[in-house]
Image (cartoon, grey):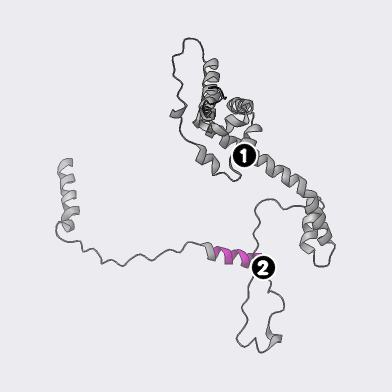
Amino acid sequence: MPSGKDNAIPMKRARRNHRKEALKRLENHWLSERAEGEEEEFDPASEPVITPLLKSVDGGIAYVLEALHTHDDEDARDFVEFYDSLSKQDREELTLEEIAYGAGIGSLRLAEVAQTALFLHGQMRVKMLLSAGLPRVVDTMLKQAVKPSGRADREWALKAGTILPTPKGAQIAIQNVIPPKEGAEDHPSERPALPIYISPEDRLRTIHEAVEQRRLPAPPSPPIDLGGRLDHMQEETVEVLHGEIL
């Protein structure tokens, strides 16, 4: 005959709240970093939300974390060390704002150091890519330079090797476009084979005329008719001076 123990209904185990446990561990870490006497309450929910901003970066949160790992800022190092110390379960349960709060830097400071880290990481990455690809670029340029049509590549190669001098200062390339004469299309012999030579004086005069400021003529105005008291002003002045002298 079965005993009463065998007929007992099995009790369901309470489901673990992993997020609540992760928050509790975060609070314990936060309290351990507080100095004695501080009465600040644990409130990670008050942190400004920055996760959508970081997700908008090309590469997402993973690329932001990669850049932060290469940054030598003190706040960036504090966040990275605390982030790496968390378990995989806690990283999934906690937000970046809460992790930044637990690291002691706050979410806004995390956004600032992330921006700087992304900038520096991008600069270093570009320089490394250029350094790694430069030999292949030079090799391709030299292969094109030895061809009959590689005049521009030869010029760049010789300038890069300091064989040809590189002109200093701003360089202005002026191309003379001479329109064909009327009917020249029917007579190819009348087309100019080469551009007409322009002397430096004529070229300078052409440039001066092109950039010279045009002055507008003054608008016409009717002449001023001096009449009335103005006609006798000189005589009255002489009389006043004459009276003062006497």
- The location of residue 83, given as percent across then percent down, is 60, 28
- In this rendered view, identify the residue nearer to me: 68 or 4: 4
- The image quarter containing residue 72 is top right
Question: What residue is disc 1 on?
Answer: 62
Does 37 sit left or right of 233 as displayed?
right
Residue at the spot 14% in from the left edge and 59% down from the top edge: 228
Which residue is drawn at the image coordinates 55% and 22% (left, top)?
Answer: 3
- The residue shown at (54%, 65%) is 210
Q: Given the image, on which type of amino acid does mark 1 rest?
A: Ala
Nearer the N terminus, badge 2 or badge 1? 1
Relative image position of residue 201 (x, y in whole percent) = 63, 65
Vertical placement of 241 versus 189: above or below? above
Instruction: For the N terminus, give its image quadrant.
Output: top right
Which residue has dot 2 on it?
199
Q: Amino acid at mark 2?
A: Ser
At which x and y percent is residue 66? 65, 36
